[in-house]
Image (cartoon, rainbow, N blue to C red):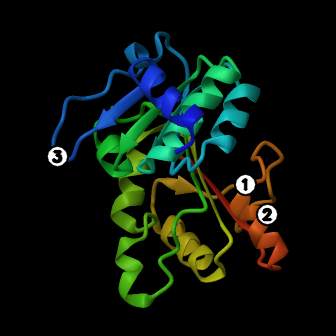
Amino acid sequence: MSGRQTDALDRLFTAYGLDVPDGPGAPIDLAGLFGRTAPVVLEIGSGMGDTTAAMASADPDRDYLAVEVHTPGIANLLDLVERHGLRNVRVAQGDALELTRRLPPGSLDAVHVFFPDPWPKSRHHKRRLIQPTHVALLRDRLASGGVLHCATDWAEYAEAMRETLDADPELVNPHGGFAPRPAHRPVTKFERRALVADRPVADLIYRRR
């Protein structure tokens, strides 16, 4: 990590961070975590945090809970939170599914899964985030009308995601297929790499009934 990132992690994690240990844990009080009651967006795999910071800055009426395992990414997002004066961001370190299990059912306004690891080899597909049991968990944490938004530049994974999401009886696809790229989703470094490599990016946007 850079000196700036190390300093941000040391100073800011206590105020804006959340540890997610493995195994059962106490439910998370979102209003207590953010210090207010507002719609909450869960950002799974926030990477270096640029996308989360940009979306939270443009959307101050909602709170953003980012979860990441990569310590430099967590530190970088904390630095962005301070530099941009973001009061509506909290950063969780640990497993996204463990975190989700501790959130109350119906507590989320949206879940964002942008460019998750595609695990391209067939023997590794079981490690993919978007699979039926995980989708059921994420959907359960969405409020009625809440949005599950996924994006990937891996064509085979995009089709697998669509098949899995279509099969969930409580999710509705208002676009009938892949969604037009929404303007509110910033271009990530993964998307820029995909565009340079001429790989199409697919957005999948579903709503809970």
Q: Residue drawn at (40%, 22%), measured in percent from left and top?
A: 30
Name the residue type under label 1.
Answer: Thr
Residues marked 1 and 2 touching at CB (< 8 Å): yes
Rounded to the nearest angstrom, the CA distance separating label 3 from label 1 is 32 Å
Asked which secondary structure carries label 3, the reply is: loop
Name the residue type under label 2.
Answer: Arg
Q: Which residue is mark 2?
A: 192
Residues marked 3 and 1 touching at CB (< 8 Å): no
Return the mark for residue 116.
Answer: none
Return the mark for residue 23.
Answer: 3
Q: Residue furthest left?
A: 24
From the image, state whether disc 3 or disc 2 is nearer to you.
2
| Left or right: residue 126 compared with residue 189 | left
Q: Which residue is mark 1?
A: 188
The 10 Å Cα crowd at callout 2, few under 14, some 14 to 19, many 20 or more, is: few
Find residue 124 and report its image quarter: bottom left
